[in-house]
Image (cartoon, rainbow, N blue to C red):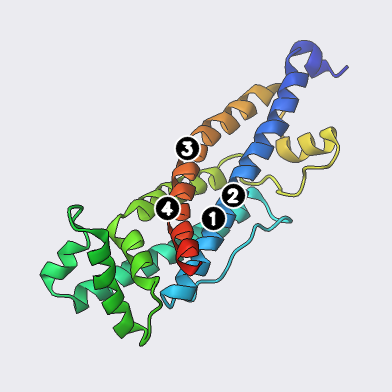
């Protein structure tokens, strides 16, 4: 038995907890990758965007993958701002305000947005107005994106940032060495707490983000059917 285990008898349990929390973080990140990539596909197909598709880099670190999502989310933000600007410039003030009026029927908002994209794109799909209203009118996705960008930046800058994505599936000792690096084994509790603190807020924000995107993508799929 290692000396640190004699001094800290809970270490074996904490090692398992570190691995479990690491997997939980990766699972959450992977779902965010898929959700973001799906939203990008919708924007490219129906709103004339040209955002590059993304996928998790299995050979990269947590920070490198955080940076990939942040970059994609930043591009989504820019496209939404661009869409909003185009509609503001092309619509009469009263019509533009209707897009943000919660009392206005959504069908009217969609019709307004569709007219704009028919002009901007030359020929807009029937889904363009729906997607634009969901993105610009509700602000839900942008609020969720802003929150996730902040949290991803914090995770990337933390002690977790340098940990590799592809270490799982290896032996426990190899995984722990990759996760802990030069950190002493008697600091396992601190590492566990770091994971838990980041995960709690990250999971909550991710769920809101994924729900907001699902609303858009599900609507598109139903319309296509």
| Tag 1–tag 2 contact (CB < 8 Å) | yes
Where residue 145 is drawn, which disc sits there?
4
Q: Which residue is mark 2?
A: 31
Dot 1 alpha-carbon crowd within 10 angstroms: few under 14, some 14 to 19, many 20 or more:
many
Where does residue 67 sit, x and y in percent of width and height?
55, 57
Q: Quadrant of the N terminus?
A: top right
Along the horizontal axis of the image, is 119 left or right of 212?
A: left
- Given this view, does label 1 or label 4 mark the residue nearer the observer? 1
Where does residue 164 sit, x and y in percent of width and height?
71, 48
Up-down relation of residue 90 to residue 109 (above or below) = below
Tell me, yes or no, if residue 160 can be seen here: no
Query: Sequence order check: which comes first, mark 1 or mark 4?
Result: 1
Q: Which residue is mark 1?
A: 35
C-alpha span from label 2 to label 3: 13 Å
Query: Sequence order check: which comes first, mark 4 or mark 2?
Result: 2
Dot 3 alpha-carbon crowd within 10 angstroms: few under 14, some 14 to 19, many 20 or more:
few
C-alpha span from label 1 to label 4: 11 Å
Query: Sequence order check: which comes first, mark 3 or mark 4?
Result: 4
């Amino acid at each position: 038995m290692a000396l640190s285990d004699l001094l800290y008898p809970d270490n074996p349990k904490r090692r398992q907890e570190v691995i479990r929390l690491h997997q939980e973080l990766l699972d959450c990140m992977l779902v965010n990758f898929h959700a973001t990539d799906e939203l990008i596909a919708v924007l490219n197909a129906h709103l004339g965007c040209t955002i590059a598709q993304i996928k998790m880099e299995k050979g990269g670190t947590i920070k490198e993958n955080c940076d990939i999502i942040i970059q994609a989310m930043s591009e989504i933000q820019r496209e939404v701002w661009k869409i909003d600007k185009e509609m503001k410039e092309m619509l009469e003030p009263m019509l533009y305000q209707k897009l943000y009026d919660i009392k206005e029927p959504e069908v009217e908002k969609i019709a307004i947005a569709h007219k704009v994209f028919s002009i901007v794109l030359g020929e807009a799909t029937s889904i363009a107005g729906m997607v634009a209203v969901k993105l610009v009118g509700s602000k839900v996705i942008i609020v969720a994106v802003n929150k996730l960008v902040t949290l991803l930046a914090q995770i990337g800058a933390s002690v977790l940032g340098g940990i590799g994505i592809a270490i799982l599936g290896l032996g426990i000792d190899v995984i722990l060495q990759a996760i802990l690096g030069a950190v002493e084994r008697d600091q396992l509790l601190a590492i566990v707490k770091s994971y838990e603190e980041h995960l709690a807020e990250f999971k909550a924000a991710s769920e809101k983000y994924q729900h907001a995107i699902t609303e858009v993508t599900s609507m598109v799929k139903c319309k296509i059917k």
